[in-house]
Image (cartoon, grey):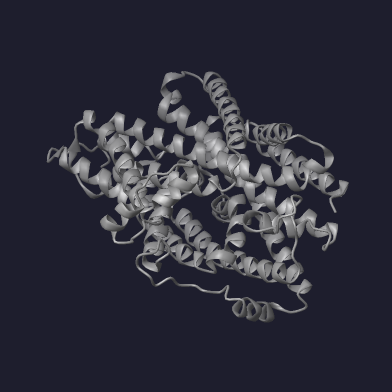
């Protein structure tokens, strides 16, 4: 049963974050906002980035999907782990060598200023949509399972949460979120362990017994060996690797924290430690999902509509049900918020940084720190308002499963970044700037068409259309469905187009 203690716990949690923000933002300037004065502790960065990498979507969606997909998500996690090694030993040395504040400056040095703007633009588009989709999902869960009991409307919940995020990131930026992300990751992981422990106890067993129950319920399948399926293990591993390379290594939000570390060696240690912990944490999420579904099979929990809880609603419905004490509900809500905030506060800060540095070029356009700070705060506030409008848009669409579409959207929009960086790093050829935008637009368009032909049923369901392409797709792809390798295909198309319209004349200033 929902009680006032949950709301009190949420308020107390926010007060703690604001206190940390007040302490860390004293004497903050643009350098501390953007890259933490390049003085961040690598252990804190590594631990805090775990929360950023997982997000509230992972917290509810990975356990919720176990009933349908078993443990096959681990294939993707294995790919993530390989990708972190590539980021650590290929991309980070480049960023430190060039002493970058924005990683997209590399594209400007290598391919021209237009490439710099294009890279930043695709990041801003992808991260804005992805972060607000994650925010919408978590605010929706809190609205249904917590705030509605107090008759707090959805719009007010969204406004207050974003206002609080704005308050504790407004002044300190990266310098602040390095600390708050550490606290939030602690809250998320502690909540994960406590929820798992409570559910295992509710089944009157221990961890080995829980594993046996999951196996008996056919929930522990790790590998998909059918090459035609999107979940085929090689596609998942390859896709996971490139998702990490692009959505971590080519993402200003993630790299902004890494390049705030004192030196390259410490930044690489940060990346390796984080990747190892993430593998273990994701295994715990999968085990939690198995225990949730075993418990639900024995003791069905219903939603307010009378439907049996499943998917993204399963974890919150069980944690906040009358079958468990209010203590587990408090743990779940704090852990959920802890999972949400690192992915939203980091996105808000990195988008502000990228727009100021890459688009407005305030480091050169504004002559003094006072002007730079005023412009940065204006941009930060503008992105907060944009986040709120996007959350309301998702609310209007009113489909929680839209998060799956957003993940696919990210695979399409991050492709140009992969193609641009790969071309800049792996070749010494130059491209005429007039061909950069066509290449970076054609890649996503062609990738979308290929995915549409490969998975017409998916788009028919999402767009509520009858496309009549199912038979056509069987002829072209022989039943093959594109999965997470979508981003690889996208990057290859952009790379190929850039190669066609390039020359041997070098155009690089990266030394």
Residue farthest to the right? 4
Residue name at image x 59 percent, y 66 percent: 67
Question: What quarter of the picture does the C terminus occupy?
Answer: top left
Snapshot quadrant of residue 328: bottom right
- State left or right for residue 450 relative to residue 298: left
Q: Indicate the position of residue 432 as horizontal and vertical percent values.
A: 19, 31
- Report whether 510 appears left or right of 460: left
**Image location of residue 282, percent across then percent down:** 56, 64
Q: Nearer the viewer, residue 45 or 430?
A: 430
> Would residue 391 be found to the left or right of residue 324 on screen?
left
Name the residue nearer the viewer: 390 or 261. 390
| x then y, percent, for residue 338 | 67, 50
Tell me, yes or no, if residue 44 can be seen here. Answer: no
Residue 124 is at least partly visible in this image:
yes
- Number of numbered tags placed on the structure image: 0
Residue 453: percent from the left, percent from the top? 33, 49
**Rendered image quadrant of residue 318:** bottom right
Q: Quadrant of the N terminus?
A: bottom right
- Left or right: 402 with respect to 490? right
Quadrant location of residue 437? top left
Q: Residue at the location (60% across, 35% down)?
A: 391
Q: Is residue 180 above or below residue 282?
A: above
């Amino acid at each position: 049963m929902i009680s006032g203690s949950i709301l009190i716990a949420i308020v107390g949690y926010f007060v703690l974050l604001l206190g940390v923000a007040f302490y860390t933002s004293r004497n903050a300037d643009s350098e501390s906002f953007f890259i933490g004065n390049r003085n961040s502790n690598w252990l804190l960065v590594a631990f805090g980035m775990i929360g950023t990498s997982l997000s509230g979507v992972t917290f509810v969606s990975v356990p919720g999907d176990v009933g349908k997909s078993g443990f096959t998500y681990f294939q993707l996690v294995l790919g993530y782990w390989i990708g972190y090694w590539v980021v650590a030993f290929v991309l980070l040395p480049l960023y430190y060598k060039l002493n970058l504040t924005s990683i997209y400056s590399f594209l400007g040095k290598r391919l021209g200023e237009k490439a710099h703007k294009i890279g930043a633009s695709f990041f801003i588009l992808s991260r804005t949509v992805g972060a607000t989709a994650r925010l919408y999902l978590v605010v929706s869960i809190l609205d249904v399972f917590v705030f509605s009991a107090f008759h707090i409307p959805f719009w007010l919940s969204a406004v207050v949460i974003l206002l609080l995020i704005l308050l504790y990131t407004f002044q300190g930026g990266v310098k602040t979120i390095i600390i708050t992300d550490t606290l939030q990751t602690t809250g998320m992981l502690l909540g994960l362990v406590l929820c798992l422990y409570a559910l295992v106890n509710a089944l009157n067993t221990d961890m080995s017994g829980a594993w046996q129950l999951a196996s008996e319920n056919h929930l522990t399948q790790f590998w998909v060996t059918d090459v035609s399926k999107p979940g085929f293990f090689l596609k998942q591993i390859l896709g996971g690797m490139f998702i990490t390379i692009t959505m971590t290594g080519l993402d200003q939000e993630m790299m902004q924290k890494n390049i705030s570390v004192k030196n390259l060696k410490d930044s690489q240690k940060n990346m390796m430690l984080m990747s190892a912990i993430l593998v273990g944490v994701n295994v715990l999420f999968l085990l939690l999902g198995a225990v949730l579904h075993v418990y639900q099979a024995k003791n069905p929990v219903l939603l307010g509509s009378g439907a049996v809880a499943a998917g993204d609603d399963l974890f919150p419905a069980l944690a906040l049900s009358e079958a468990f004490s209010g203590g587990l509900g408090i743990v779940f809500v704090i852990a959920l918020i802890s999972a949400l905030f690192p992915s939203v506060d980091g996105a808000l800060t990195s988008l502000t940084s990228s727009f100021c540095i890459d688009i407005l070029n305030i480091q050169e356009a504004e002559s003094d720190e006072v002007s730079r700070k005023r412009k940065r705060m204006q941009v930060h506030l503008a992105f907060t308002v944009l986040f709120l409008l996007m959350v309301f848009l998702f609310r209007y669409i009113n489909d929680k499963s839209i998060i799956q579409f957003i993940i696919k959207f990210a695979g399409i929009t991050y492709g140009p970044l992969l193609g641009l960086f790969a071309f800049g790093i792996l070749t010494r050829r130059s491209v005429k700037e007039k061909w950069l935008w066509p290449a970076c637009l054609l890649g996503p368009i062609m990738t979308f068409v290929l995915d549409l032909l490969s998975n017409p049923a998916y788009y028919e369901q999402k767009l509520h259309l009858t496309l009549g392409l199912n038979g056509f797709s069987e002829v072209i792809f022989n039943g093959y469905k594109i999965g997470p390798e979508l981003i690889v295909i996208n990057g290859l198309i952009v790379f190929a187009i850039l190669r066609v319209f390039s020359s041997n004349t070098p155009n690089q200033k990266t030394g």
